[in-house]
Image (cartoon, rainbow, N blue to C red):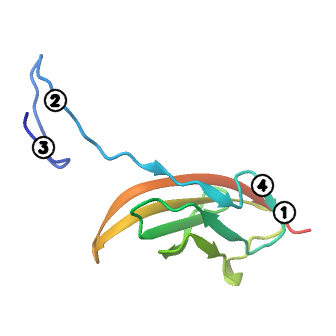
Amino acid sequence: MACFTLAEQVSLDAGDNVEVDLPVGRAIQPIEPAPKSAVTDTTPTFHWRSIAGANEYEVSLGTAHLMEWVYVGPDTTFTLADSLAISPGNWARWTVTAWRRVSERSRDYLGEFEGIATFSVE
């Protein structure tokens, strides 16, 4: 069986067989805020379960359709900065993507999750 990289184009004829081995992302489990939860802090702490092999996580946060990176680093806990506080009564969507950094300019995708949480201040 021949091996190909994802960057190669391969032509196949009828009856040819090809085995494809593609990386599959693993789900990151959110801990807090839990999806569809309500919190009372406008600068909540986000926490998620680690993925084996990951040494870098990206957290994106947004309201409506705009998403913004708010954290990139090795930790599985992050507190939103005061300058990024979420207005009371608004909802926000947050995502975490896990990576294994292999060099300064290269990293491997390991998994992600997207959670929706409502944030309100009483």
Residue 27, given in percent of the width and then of the height, sits at 50, 50
Q: Closer to the N terminus: mark 4 or mark 3?
A: 3
Q: Which residue is mark 3?
A: 4
Q: Closer to the N terminus: mark 1 or mark 3?
A: 3
What's the distance in space between the residues labelled 2 and 4, CA to CA? 45 Å
Question: What's the residue type where badge 3 is placed?
Answer: Phe
Q: How many marks?
A: 4
Left/right placement of residue 95 relative to residue 111 reads right
Residue 15, given in percent of the width and then of the height, sits at 12, 16
Question: What's the residue type where badge 1 is placed?
Answer: Gly
Are discs 1 and 2 less than 8 Å apart at CB? no
The numbered dot on residue 89 is 1
Q: Closer to the N terminus: mark 2 or mark 4?
A: 2
Question: What's the residue type where badge 2 is placed?
Answer: Val
Q: Closer to the N terminus: mark 1 or mark 2?
A: 2
Q: Which residue is mark 2?
A: 18
